[in-house]
Image: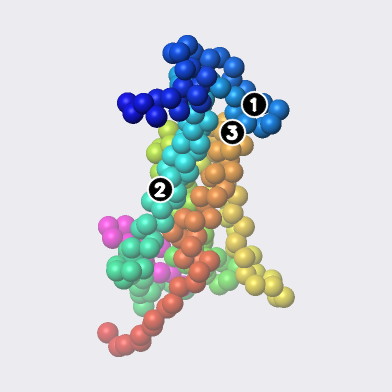
């Protein structure tokens, strides 16, 4: 070690003769008093470690947030088809019954009887709420599994409201059966506002239509 540097360290630590000084603290002048090299190192680690943990936690949280929205962003950039549905209202079916095909799934849609339908299946807005509710529950389950949280059962209750003098709105209530902390509850409340279907509804979706004779 350079002699000048060694002497400077000795002066700073009060250890010119190699004896450890143990006078840590702050002087009346506000300057850090002498302390040994091991003490100085321990003090530095004690201050830096919590800050490092905070930075790591913040970076991890940001990464998890990015994962939740990455699929939505990639879909926007690449114009990928993420869902395809075919709806057929057959000529011989009663009233407003619709045959819905989603991949290998066969569903029905209809209007309720108070709107002259046969109530053979959920109404169109029921499917809209089902899409939002299922996306909400699935996203929370994915996030909880990644974090190692036990949510128990996740229940999402929704209703679509439309009034004469106000814009339509959706009320969404989410509950979990397992006990969670307030911090976890707040985190889940933040997550549900950024699920893919939530973002699609809030941001609006362009609809390009075409009518043809098949």
Q: Residue furthest top?
A: 19
Apparent side of residue 103 relative to residue 45 in the rendered image (left or right): left
Q: Which residue is mark 3?
A: 181
Q: Earlier in the sequence, mark 1 or mark 3?
A: 1
Q: Earlier in the sequence, mark 2 or mark 1?
A: 1
Kindly report which numbered mark, 1 or 3, lies closer to the viewer in this rendering.
1
Kindly report which numbered mark, 3 or 2, lies closer to the viewer in this rendering.
2
Apparent side of residue 60 relative to residue 86 in the rendered image (left or right): right
Q: Which residue is mark 2?
A: 63
Q: Position of residue 97 (x, y in %)?
A: 43, 69
For the magenta stretch, what is the residue range?
96-108
- Within-10-Å neighbours for mark 1: few <14, some 14–19, many 20+: few
Compared with residue 43, is residue 208 higher up or lower down, i.e. above or below? Answer: below
- Within-10-Å neighbours for mark 2: few <14, some 14–19, many 20+: few
Q: Are marks 1 and 3 in contact (CB under 8 Å)?
A: no
Give me the disc on residue 26.
1
Q: Residue at x 58, y 38 (%)?
A: 183
Q: Earlier in the sequence, mark 3 or mark 2?
A: 2
Apparent side of residue 194 relative to residue 72 in the rendered image (left or right): right
- Whole-Å distance between the Cαs marked 2 and 1? 40 Å
Q: Residue at x 28, y 60 (%)?
A: 103
Q: Position of residue 10 (x, y in %)?
A: 46, 22
- Element at badge 3? loop
**Quadrant assignment for the C terminus:** bottom left
Q: Residue at x 70, y 75 (%)?
A: 164
Compared with residue 115, is residue 56 higher up or lower down, i.e. above or below? Answer: above
Give me the disc on residue 59.
none
- Element at badge 1? loop
């Amino acid at each position: 070690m350079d002699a000048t540097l060694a002497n400077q360290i000795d002066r700073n630590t009060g250890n010119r003769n190699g004896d450890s000084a143990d006078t840590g603290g702050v002087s009346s002048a506000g300057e850090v008093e002498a302390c040994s090299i091991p003490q100085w190192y321990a003090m530095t680690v004690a201050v830096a470690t919590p800050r490092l943990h905070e930075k790591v936690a913040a970076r991890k949280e940001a990464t998890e947030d990015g994962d939740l929205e990455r699929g939505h962003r990639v879909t926007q950039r690449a114009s990928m088809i993420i869902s395809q549905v075919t709806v057929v209202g057959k000529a011989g079916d009663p009233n407003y019954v619709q045959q819905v095909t989603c991949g290998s799934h066969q569903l029905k849609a209809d209007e309720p009887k108070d709107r002259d339908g046969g109530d053979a299946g959920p109404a169109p807005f029921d499917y809209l709420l089902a899409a939002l509710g299922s996306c909400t529950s699935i996203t929370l389950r994915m996030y909880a599994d990644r974090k190692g949280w036990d949510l128990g059962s996740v229940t999402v209750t929704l209703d679509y409201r439309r009034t004469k003098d106000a814009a339509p709105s959706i009320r969404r209530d989410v509950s979990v059966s397992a006990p969670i902390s307030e911090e976890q509850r707040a985190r889940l409340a933040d997550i549900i506002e950024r699920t893919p279907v939530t973002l699609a509804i809030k941001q609006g979706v362009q609809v390009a239509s075409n009518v043809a004779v098949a």
